[in-house]
Image (cartoon, grey):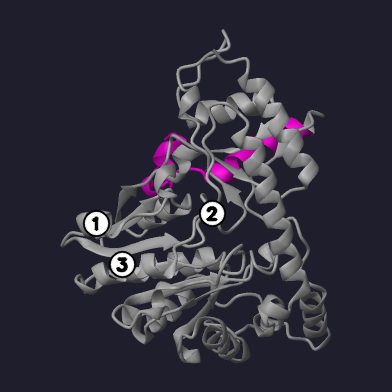
Amino acid sequence: MNEDQILSARVRAMSESATLEMTRKSRELKEKGIDVITLSIGEPDFNTPEAVKNAARKAIDNNLTHYPPVPGIPELRKAISEKLLRDNQLSYKASQIIVSNGAKQSIANAFFCLLNDGDEVVIPAPFWVSYPEMVKMAGGVPRFISTTVDQDFKISAAQLEDAITSKTKAFIFSSPCNPSGSVYNKAELQALASVFARHPHVYIISDEIYEFIRFDGKHESIAQFPEVFERVILINGLSKGFAMTGWRVGYMAAPQFIADACNTFQGQYTSGSCTISQAAALEAIKTDPGNCHELNDMINQFRKRRDLLFTALSQIEGFIPNKPDGAFYMFPDVSFFYGKSNGVCTVKNSYDLCLYLLDKAHVALVSGDAFGSDNCIRFSYATSEDQILEAAERIKLALAQLH
């Protein structure tokens, strides 16, 4: 019996995360002594705020080291409820909050508790790489809505209306978006909510993990609209806004029956998130984002880097960059280079272009096909300004060899 016969069909059908794949490839080159600039990873290059780390140290000293309640420690669930009211004017009871091992698990919980085999999930493209794989793991069928850089990678109400069928069980999107950094404003969300109001069988999973990394205006959630509030599953966490990627704390706010189902599911799957991480998360959640020096400094630096990268990419012939309003990604259209060759290799798609740039420019990026938009590639500007400028120059020189 060979290995494929031993492994389940489920795991054999899964794709490796494209972001993790490119990180692995760049790490392998670095281990060979090659100077690789990594613009592929979706992680803030900042440290967790000191007050948050101190809360974790205190939790250890106080022996907060025993099994936590499955849906999260009561103090944290209450604090999240208060945060949603403070920052988003959304009213949730603590019982409607489920704390998980990162926002990724919160999303997976929602899919496993909502989907039956064959249920369809509408996903705007570009999308975060794990959405379709999670849908398929839960027995669902992903259905995509394509967008372009000319739309700022945001769907219209008409596109949404056309995508919904009697088989549609859920819709998932992120705002601010990974990979494009695009942000839906209140009017755009209202237009989508009006469509959902006509389709009461559809549940809306709103991934708001990049909420605090906004460059203009205030964050808007689709949960604010009464006509859809009872069908919104809001996903958030501490990884991005408070640079807590390694702490693994995410959460959902959901209708009570969905929260109860996710509590049951998580209880059989992983149980509760790490107690020390939850103590740190409690300190972060209680922090008023407007008065957090570390958060505001991070946002200001990301804004400067965005502007720097946008200017640099705009000067490369064939690149059509978007200027994102949030997160720390840029998603330029690079289809100009498809069909071009340096005499040795021919670029046929976004994956080929990323491999070419990794090989010739030693810059690690992520291909747009992984996000459902093969005409684009993703830049993460969670790195220094010097690295951004050096990467752009290397890319410009490498692309000049394609004809």
Q: Identify the residue under disc 2.
A: 181
Residue at left offset 60%, top offset 36%: 314
Q: Earlier in the sequence, mark 2 or mark 3?
A: 2
Give the class, few, some or many, for how many residues have Cα within 10 Å of label 2's Cα (few <14, many ≥20): many
Position of 374 compared to 244: left or right?
left
Residue 86 belongs to the span the image colors magenta? no
> What label sits on residue 25 in the rendered view?
none
Q: Secondary structure at mark 2?
A: loop
- Report the predominant secondary structure element of the magenta stretch: helix
> Closest to the observer: 207 or 222?
222
Whole-percent x, y for residue 336 in the image: 47, 25
Q: Identify the residue under disc 1.
A: 158
Q: Quadrant of residue 164?
A: bottom left
Residue 360 visible to the viewer: no
* Magenta span of residues: 1-30
Given contact means CB atoms under 8 Å apart, are the residues at marks 2 and 3 in contact? no
Q: Quadrant of residue 102?
A: bottom right
